Amino acid sequence: MVRTLIGLFALLILASPVRSQPEDPALDPQFEGQIAYFGNYTGVTSLPVEGRDAQRACPGRERRCGERIVGGGVKVVLSFAGERVSGFFLSVGGFTGPNGLAEGTLVGRRTSAGCELYQADGTMWQANVCGARGFRGTIASVAGTPKQAAIEFSTVGMYLRDAGAISRLAQEAAQRERRIDWLRNRLARGGPADAAFRLSVELDSYSRHYRGIDPDWLEDPVASGKPGRNRQWTLESRYAAQGTSGTVRATMLGDRVLCLAWDGGECLPIGDPAPFPTPDPADDDDGWLSRSPAPIAEPGPHRDR
């Protein structure tokens, strides 16, 4: 049933002409990652004819016969590293013989108008849309190459892996761990009550939200009760963090923080930091980034035309 639906989907794509579509918002200039696209291509190609009858059957300097109309589904995977772009394409369910799009690699760069990519034989992919939601444009062969092509392609983004965001989150997680270790070590050294309060509040805030609280968002604490070495008293302050605000109150014993009560809740010891939700860079892409027709169609024998 699933394969039948995939086949119907592919037929609908092949039957629909390449149409102008709303512009895809540009990717961030510093975007690093991969995007997998799927769509269709259609156009004409021609190859020189060899043999004794080439002059009679195909007059002209390049011995070219009639053009072949080609088309089919195409999977494209592009890797972005700022301005630089590389990737590969794979014809799916179309003509993959000498006249078809077949498969190959792409190397080029992003431009103000989209992307300008090249195959090894000089064929250029000029994309006026080269973003997260689509990759569309034309394919044209450089003069003098054996295979000449004039093709239009239109694809939509199917899978995006933002490697830059994953890297930045990993760096943030490492910085957070270093900050937590510093807070714990600093608290263990002791110090004035106000300093112990601020350190404890920041450390405990990581148990409430994985990004914690910016210490600059904590107002100067106000004391309640008379401080003493063997006497409990309180320090209370207002805070702002993660788009919210409230109060935090510490029960003190001398210069030590015994527990913290957030927003009028129960006074509890400093909690363990919440897990940092770092994405797995090896997450399952369902085959979209692989050099195979998956997950669009099962690999099969190439067809010629």
Image (cartoon, rainbow, N blue to C red):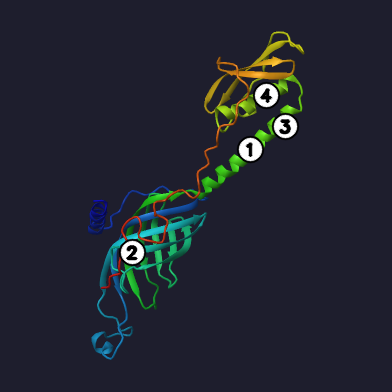
* Position in image of residue 199 (x %, y %): 68, 26
Which label lies toward us, 1 or 4? 1
Which label lies toward us, 3 or 4? 3
What residue is disc 2 on? 91
Which quadrant of the view contains residue 7?
A: bottom left
The residues bearing labels 2 and 3 have C-alpha atoms spaced at a distance of: 59 Å
* Position in image of residue 241 (x %, y %): 56, 26
Which label lies toward us, 2 or 1? 1
Pick whichever of labels 2 and 1 is earlier in the sequence. Answer: 2
Q: Could you classify mark 2 by the number of other residues whose Cα lies within 10 Å: few (under 14), some (14-19), or many (20 or more)?
A: many
Between 92 and 245, the residue placed more toward the observer is 92
Between 221 and 289, the residue placed more toward the observer is 289
Pick whichever of labels 1 and 4 is earlier in the sequence. Answer: 1
The residues bearing labels 2 and 1 have C-alpha atoms spaced at a distance of: 47 Å
Q: Amino acid at mark 4?
A: Arg
Q: Amino acid at mark 1?
A: Glu
What residue is disc 4 on? 198
Question: Residue 177 has which mark?
Answer: 1
Note whether 83 is above or below 283 in the view shown.
Answer: below
* Position in image of residue 91 (x %, y %): 33, 64
What residue is disc 3 on? 185
